[in-house]
Amino acid sequence: MKKLLLGDEAIALGAINAGLSGVYAYPGTPSTEITEFIQNDPLARERGVHSRWCTNEKTAMEAALGMSYAGKRALVCMKHVGMNVCADAFVNSAITGVKGGLVVLAADDPSMHSSQNEQDSRFYAKFALVPCFEPSNQQEAYDMMTSAFELSEKLQEPVVLRVVTRLAHSRAGVEVTEPVAEKPLSPSTDAWVLLPGIARKKYVALLEKQDAMKQAAEESRYNRVEKSASKLGILACGIAYNYVKEAVGGESNLVKISQYPLPEKKIKALAAECDALMVIEDGQPVVEETVKGLLGAGYPVKGRLTGDLPRTGELTPDSVAKALGKEVGAVYAPAKNMAPRPPQLCQGCGHRDVYTALNQVLAEYPDHRVFGDIGCYTLGALPPFKSLSSCVDMGASITMAKGAADAGLFPAVAVIGDSTFTHSGMTGLLDAVNDKANITVVISDNLTTGMTGGQDSAGTNKFEAICLGLGVEPEHVRVVVPLPKNMPEITQVIKEEIEYKGVSVIIPRRECIQTFARHARAKKQ
């Protein structure tokens, strides 16, 4: 049977049909659709596949590792910056090893379409010394789920599957196979206790598996050789393989790379036949740097580091064709009479009223700073509000405000969303409470994870209890309804809490205008 699927959907269906028992994830573009597909899939529902959103990527990774410990196949999904959040558990999972197949899906975002950076998750796989798959198309994304689970169970190690935005969010026909049964419950009998004495032995065992990982890459059907008479050899990684084929057609002398560690024998054989190698990879120069070391300083290796390809941003058919010396057609610039339209908060969004009130009050404090966080409310940094002074990473608003207050800055205000607060803001608030920091924290609660499409938020209807449990004084946990008619009340509350010399929390609460509309439509049906 053939289905038209997004890359994310192909991954999700591939996992279900490979006998998945649980997916663990925190929503983040471009990975969100994987979990949503599994949540809505009839077979996954029939089988009771676990698919509830997690509080953050670290809890997701740990829960998936627990399912693997129990002998079942688990998938953990995140965008690339989520790998930073789960890194402790992820790297240590390579030392503990796994039992049931464990696949870590990292969705990278070259060109930063909806991200803070362009980091490349292949580095994480290399760092942790585990295999990595990188599909070049939707069919491979589907097929690789079975391959990755099987390799994970064979090596008893987690396996990374790395995709990029262009593949995750484009569609293609996928030949679908019949689903297999889930693995039976069979908890591990090994000690997964990383006391130093045990961890040292397990690390040696991980190192001893490296030859098997390399051999698996050499023999992988996803790493293949294509021959031509060209003296320029090409290493085409993941989705970049498609750009190469579009540029040169059948005239390629290349190694297609979609499984790591690198197939060194294939690369060395190609290099021996060619005068130079061109490494074409979407993301950072992971392969280019490695191949330079593999072949030695005297062998010419071209790519992003040499300027033959752009150093930043995602690859395109045109940039690849140009690097390969092919003629590129005209590139059309946007029409001159089209005004730029930056993203804005939705009309009717409660965050708008929060920023209106903040700006009104903080105008009286010329030295104020507002520390922002990751979410749709980050758009408060742009006109017409221009409220935010910072946005660094999930949860940083509270801790940065605390640090600035420690330095003597007043007033120091943190603005954080409901989902981000439970993701990684709670520990920062505990630090602030323990230090009696002079900060005002605004948890702008729109009752959902709005930026990624309205997924459940882990702390909904729990924020007052959480703040009180962390030690915020009850009289300084204030709830308001962000509406224009309530502006006098909201501004008064903000003024009072800024003047309080300690930690105060203001919770403006009103449902996201988008989820409100969806819920209203659902009620009419």
Image (cartoon, grey):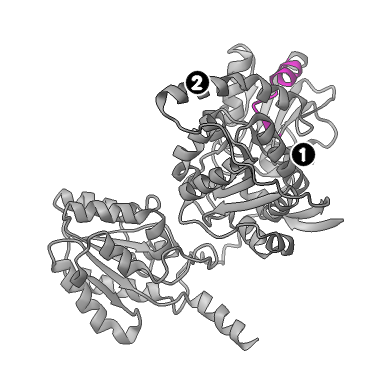
Q: Is residue 481 above or below residue 221?
A: below
Horizontal arrangement in the rendering, residue 262 relative to residue 405 (left or right): right
Q: Position of residue 132 (x, y in %)?
A: 63, 34
The residue singled out by tag 1 in the image is 247
The answer to whether residue 321 is visible is no
Q: Is residue 414 above or below residue 86?
A: below
Residue type at numbered disc 2: Lys
Q: Residues within 10 Å of mark 1 (few under 14, many from 20)?
A: many
Q: Is residue 278 magenta?
A: no
Magenta residues span 258-271
Answer left or right for 500 relative to 482.
left
* Residue 286 falls left or right of residue 379: right
| The C terminus sits in image quarter | bottom right
Question: Disc 1 versus disc 2: distance between alpha carbons?
Answer: 49 Å
State whether residue 68 appears in this view: yes
- Please provide percent x and percent y for residue 229: 84, 22
Taking the spot 79% from the left edge, 38% from the top edge, the residue there is 245
Residue 201 disc label:
2
> Which quadrant would residue 488 be assigned to in this image?
bottom left
Percent of width and height locating residue 483: 35, 82
The amino acid pointed to by label 1 is: Ala
Q: Are marks 1 and 2 in contact (CB under 8 Å)?
A: no
